[in-house]
Amino acid sequence: MTTRRYKKQERHEQILLELKLKPHVRVAELAKQFGVTTETVRRDIEDLGRDGLLQRAHGGASARHAGAHHDLDARRHQRVAERERLGRFAASLVAEGSSIMVDAGATTMEFARFLAFAETRVTVITNSLQVAMILGQSPATDVRLAPGEYLPREAAVVGTETCEYLAGYNVDACFIGAAGLSEVGVTEAIAGFGAVKRAMMRQSRVRHFLIDASKFGQTHMTRVASLDEIGSLVSDRHPTAPLSGVLRERGVRMLSPDIQKSAPARA
Amino acid sequence: MTTRRYKKQERHEQILLELKLKPHVRVAELAKQFGVTTETVRRDIEDLGRDGLLQRAHGGASARHAGAHHDLDARRHQRVAERERLGRFAASLVAEGSSIMVDAGATTMEFARFLAFAETRVTVITNSLQVAMILGQSPATDVRLAPGEYLPREAAVVGTETCEYLAGYNVDACFIGAAGLSEVGVTEAIAGFGAVKRAMMRQSRVRHFLIDASKFGQTHMTRVASLDEIGSLVSDRHPTAPLSGVLRERGVRMLSPDIQKSAPARA
DNA sequence: AGTATTTTTTGGGAAGAGCCACAACACGAC
DNA sequence: GTCGTGTTGTGGCTCTTCCCAAAAAATACT
């Protein structure tokens, strides 16, 4: 029966599914589609928004970008600004005509956005579906995706197949994100990611770790690399006192964008 | 004062950048940010939208979903009802606990949606990023993604790597879409897809071709399969006179959902 | 069955967004 | 300098969306 009423939960799932396929849905549209009032849909969207499953917008809802951070609005905006600086800077490190490997994660995604924007001619190998999609939009970029088990949480593939695949390529540089950087080294929270990151490191002449300042001092479950193995650390800020010394000692090249801020025009 | 005026072009770039960072921006927000009128921003958005660089929305603009491209999205909106019926029916063909391969394309994407909705316990191997993302949502589904060159137009991977990878698995069934079905057989318009489809066919015990009725009689560039090789044809309607005879003759099993339509409630 | 609880609808006013046409302003060319 | 083109701002208006609260319907519970 096509006239069957959607239950609340079904509508929720349907909305999320819809959002996977297009970036934005309208309240009015969904209401017509489900055969319910706009008010009902509005409430659905509110529910889902509360759980951080989508982003509200006037007139409808937008898909949430990977990377769940529904903090305070002001803080998120701040954080984004830093990430943006980091991403922009990291993208400038990519040489025209080179080949690179790009890790999965919110920070590397940001990096990918700038790299796509810059239209640098480059060959990219990645295990992140998001990175592939972003860079695929740039006509200057050749993207190869690694195989493996699909991890919905991160929209990336992992596993032995992934690592084996990566082992088949040698590239100029890799750009790797991480959940933590401390005296212990680079660490990651998500199991399975560590092996992939290490596989990328092995195949790259130059290693760039993209880690924003908020991760400094943090240690997580799996070790990705010891301090000696870090080639260069790319961050939005230079590490401060205790950590910076250790890093310098261990031969880590620390890179960060020059901060020549002028008074913000935007209030 | 640093409140220097942004030029039109600068605003455009900034808007696009903003959209790469968050999925949705509001007109009012941007207006405040740039220090211009909402009307101006509206015009900016209109310009960018005309070039297909973003998606308009009431109250603002949304990013073009990475991977969700015009043609793919447009095709999705054509013949929705038919495609939906086809997808739903095809999903019902998947046995609990089985392993399948799923091809890229608008039709198979619809199929994937229903399969995810049904939460059938199944292992899926695919070369489509969209299919992977959709099915990855279902906790009952295990998804493996094939490697290969990324094709932004279709959000899928292709190439020899893809085919080689697929050759490493043997599955119960495959679900393959196509651009055309005629007396010649199954044909495809996009180069590179044919080889992948054939690779999937080789590794599957049962072959399902998901082809909606609008493709009947059409012939495209590359041949995917001869009529003998088609296992079963899944469609929204049974083929009519000239084609149906040939298909029956060549041993094609024709499947389509029983059409017990009631008056459409939603329209 | 009948009651309780959740969910949806309805209605109306406030706020926001869209659209249009014309005026004001900037910038480059001559 | 003036002219012309292109861009931006303003005001007036309409339409959509939002939000709230109460009624109605559907669903779950005993």
Image: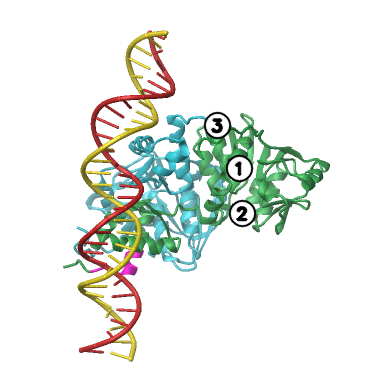
Chain colours: A cyan, B green, C yellow, D red
Q: Position of residue B213 (x, y in %)?
A: 67, 46
**Residue B20, image quadrant:** bottom left
The amino acid on which the numbered mark 3 sits, given as a three-letter code, is Ala
The amino acid on which the numbered mark 1 sits, given as a three-letter code, is Glu
Dot placed on the residue nearer the N-terminal end, 1 or 2:
1
Q: In 3D space, how far apart are the residues under numbered discs 1 and 2 (Cα atoms)?
A: 28 Å
Read off the residue under disc 3.
B118
User: Which region shows up in magenta?
Assistant: B5-13
Q: Quadrant of the C terminus of chain A?
A: bottom left
Asked whether residue A211 is in view, the answer is: no
Read off the residue under disc 2.
B158
Q: Position of residue A138 (x, y in %)?
A: 48, 62
Callout 2: SS: strand
The amino acid on which the numbered mark 2 sits, given as a three-letter code, is Val
Left or right: A171 as drawn, with respect to B206: left
B237 to B224, vertically: above or below: above
